[in-house]
């Protein structure tokens, strides 16, 4: 649960902006999307490896980003 402490004189827009930032930092939406479907651990590992290989190739200059 996200709680925003707002002062009495604070604008509602500022409070809403604080809430949105806190919501993003908590990564609530990312967690909800991950829980929508089950991904096997082997597929997660394979994706991590492919991502690491891609990053190494970009660092080596084989791909243009």
Image (cartoon, grey):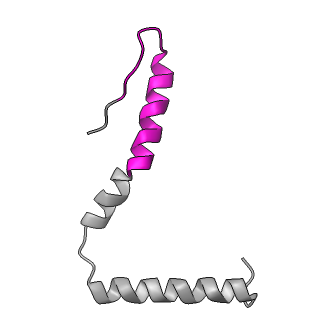
**x, y percent for residue 18:** 46, 32
Quick check: 43 above or below 22?
Answer: below
**x, y percent for residue 10:** 48, 14
Quick check: 23 above or below 42?
Answer: above
Principal SS element in the magenta part? Answer: helix
Left or right of 49? Residue 28 is left
Quadrant of image for the N terminus: top left
Quick check: 15 above or below 65?
Answer: above
Count of residue discs: 0
To which quarter of the image does residue 58 belong? bottom right
Quick check: 29 above or below 18?
Answer: below
Who is closer to the viewer here, 55 or 65? 55
Residue 12 belongs to the span the image colors magenta: yes
Seen at 49% across and 22% down, the residue is 13
Left or right of 7? Residue 14 is right
Residue 59 belongs to the span the image colors magenta: no
Seen at 47% across and 40% down, the residue is 21
Seen at 31% across and 31% down, the residue is 3
Seen at 50% across and 88% down, the residue is 50
**x, y percent for residue 45:** 37, 86
To which quarter of the image does residue 54 belong? bottom right
Give the magenta part as a residue range: 4-26
Quadrant of image for the C terminus: bottom right
To which quarter of the image does residue 32 belong? bottom left
Residue furthest top as drawn: 9
């Amino acid at each position: 649960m996200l709680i925003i402490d707002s002062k009495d004189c604070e604008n509602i827009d500022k409070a809403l902006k604080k809430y949105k930032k806190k919501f993003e930092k908590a990564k609530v939406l990312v967690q909800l999307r991950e829980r929508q479907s089950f991904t096997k651990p082997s597929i997660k590992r394979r994706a991590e490896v492919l991502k690491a290989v891609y990053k190494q190739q970009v660092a080596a200059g084989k791909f243009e980003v």
